[in-house]
Image (cartoon, rainbow, N blue to C red):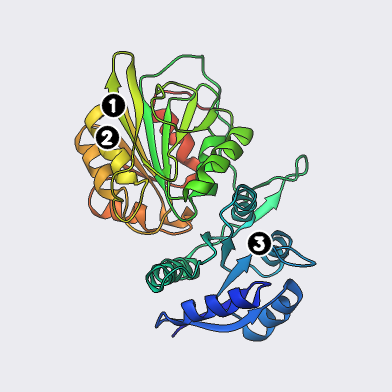
Amino acid sequence: MSIRVLVIDDSALMRKLLTEVINGAPDLEVVGAAPDAATAREMIKALNPDVLTLDVQMPRMDGLEFLEKLMRLRPTPVVMVSAFTQAGSETTLRALELGAVDFIAKPRAESVQSLEEYGRELAEKIRAAKAARLRLQRPTAASGRTVPTTSAPQLQRPAAGACGKIIFLGASTGGTEAIKEFLLGMPADCPPILIVQHMPEAFTASFAARLNSLCPPRVLEAQGGEKVVPGTVLIAPGHSHMLVRRSASGLVTELSRADPVNRHRPSVDVLFDAAAAQAGNQAVGVLLTGMGKDGAQGMLRMRQAGARTFAQDEASCVVYGMPREAFMIGAVDEVVALEEMARRVLACCGRGVA
């Protein structure tokens, strides 16, 4: 049976283009196309779609307001269709906080080939959204920010100082919120953390800035050449692989524009392979929610090099793809629920918990 999709966009041209692209996949069917939130609301009731594609900028009620109401009243998998601008990236990150499963750029009809590639990517995201577990959110009374319905245990802040371990983390679909929850469980002087989240380059700077404003450690988008030090989280930029190399002062980051690995740049496997080669048993590997298999082989090589490895469990994943692949090939020491991940990883690093 086909996955039933409702397209929501205020542009008639974009509705037509998205409809054609989605209907090009044999297992997807566009059952309707709505120009605004009011029309979408009625079409959802009448058509009961499996997945929505949702524009951010819409008249009268924008995509965020519509998404917030949808997730509260009728939770449905949503793929955001976003403009790749700074404002668009910040809005899209907010949409992921509100419960959207994933996002994609608006298509550009530059060539038949680019539209074919776009169609394959969008189809994959819609299929993943249909299979995803929606993590419902609730607002906090103090700030209006959203937090997961289950919260991580409180951590006892240890004395300052490095513990000698370095955390290497990878994630994809559902990863922006999973990473946020993981970092909210980290103290300000946590072990160094290096992260690859599959995300286009227009988004990683905004993602790092958002995390930096919310989480105890300092969070930065890597520029290359940074020292790997406690209390600092480095996010791979969307245009480059991130590696580490030895220098006279210790490990430093290195960026590479080499070809994509597992169709991704940055790739989790590239980071994990560097961790295995340069950090060995000093490394701790963490693989969170995500579609596909990127990171599985790299995590196996980390484990073989003496690293301790953790994978998110199926029940707490939005998409149980990457952690499952790692578990299936014997790359994982411990399978852990997301809400317990920070505590378990800190314990592995020799850090106390309450």
Q: SS class of the residue under badge 3?
A: loop
Of residues 293 and 312, the one drawn nearer to the viewer in this rendering: 293
- How many numbered badges does the structure rendering display? 3
Q: Mark 3 belongs to which amino acid?
A: Val
Q: Is residue 49 left or right of residue 141?
A: left
Q: Residue at x 47, y 82 (%)?
A: 23
Q: Residue at x 41, y 79 (%)?
A: 25
Quick one: label 2 or label 3, which is nearer the N terminus? 3
Q: Residue at x 65, y 54 (%)?
A: 137
Q: Position of residue 310 (x, y in %)?
A: 36, 41
Q: Position of residue 83 (x, y in %)?
A: 59, 58
Indicate whether 188 appears above or below 92.
above
Q: Mark 1 belongs to which amino acid?
A: Arg
- Tag 1 residue: 245
Residue 274: which numbered mark, if any? Answer: 2
Q: SS class of the residue under badge 2?
A: helix
